[in-house]
Amino acid sequence: MESLTTFLNYLKYEKRVSDHTLKAYQTDLFQFFEFILGPLELQNLDSESKKIETQQIRNWIFSLVEQEHNSSKSINRKLSSLKSYFKYLRKIGMIHEDPTIAISSQKVPKRVPQYIEMSDMDKLFTLDLFEDHFEGWRDRTIIELFYATGMRLSELLNLTFGDIDLYNQTVKVLGKRNKERLIPFGNQAKTTLEKYFLHFEQKFGNFSQNSCIFVTSKNNKLNPKTVYKIVRRYLDMITTIDQRSPHVIRHTFATHLLNNGADINAIKEILGHSGLAATQIYTHNSIEKLKSIYQQAHPRA
């Protein structure tokens, strides 16, 4: 299994992928090789990798398609993991032909990102939903920062006190591929952060610039699952949309900015997208809003 280990190390130390992404690669590759070789043959993975043929990969994809819980998007992610692995093997000279070259990705139906209405987000912060103690202010600050900045879950979890500049109202985040960017935030987020910092000091004492901002009641760094539960709990109170996750608040942030006249290139920079195509998905929401206004306002609609 040396080739798989060196590939994962390559992703971690040279490509600098996140721990979450690294785990996804590992899971996808183990799933593929268990399908091809069986669980007892994985020790022969290096020699068997050289023998993999395109048809075997197609058979694996067919088996994934037959399983109802696998969406086209998830299958494409697994295939992408496999393509990256064989591309790496060819790069280091372990194989001469890539068996994934002739494999095409699954067609993914275009979906308009779900988002929360502005009136519902207002309810979240104006109604008395958050309790007045450390955990309550922590939860409010988490959701406030997601909505004020559009940052990713992984970016929020890695924030330290030194990343927050209350005077200039900016937050420094470390995004994909270890790219840093500064995101501005408004007065309401600033007030919430200040109150949360006070509760943090009252509970744990003075904090250092390198301390994680979002922690448990025992001062341990929060994990992604806990943040998902926090976000889901509060979004359940104000919306009935299917998806109620941190990423939906990111969609909401981008959609509300675009609907209120923000430049799409500015939104791209704030979100940390490498290209404009990823940001343009939010224009669909704007078009749908225009259609709705047209239907309500035009006398012959």
Image: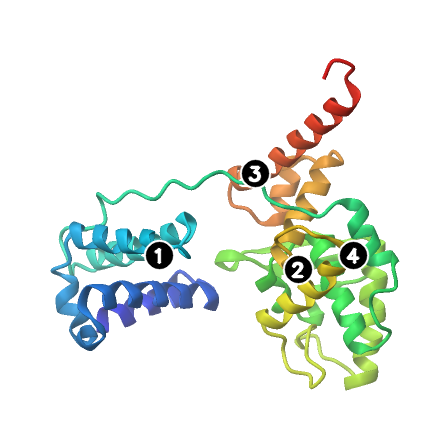
Assess disc 1: are there few (<14), some (14-19) or many (≥20) residues with their C-alpha within 10 Å of its C-alpha.
few
Please tell me which residue lies in front, 117 or 296.
296
**What quarter of the picture does the C terminus occupy?**
top right
Residue located farthest toward the top when viewing the structure as drawn: 300
Residue 72 drawn at (x, y percent): 40, 48
The residue labelled by disc 1 is 67
Q: CA distance from mark 1 to mark 3?
A: 28 Å
Label 1 vs 3, first from the N-terminus? 1
Assess disc 4: are there few (<14), some (14-19) or many (≥20) residues with their C-alpha within 10 Å of its C-alpha.
some
Label 3 vs 2, first from the N-terminus? 2
Is disc 1 in contact with disc 2, using a CB cutoff of under 8 Å? no
* Helix, strand or loop under label 2: strand
Q: Nearer the viewer, mark 1 or mark 3?
A: 1
The residue labelled by disc 4 is 169
Horizontal relation, residue 43 to residue 251: left or right: left
**What quarter of the picture does the N terminus occupy?**
bottom left
Is disc 3 in contact with disc 2, using a CB cutoff of under 8 Å? no
Q: CA distance from mark 2 to mark 4?
A: 10 Å
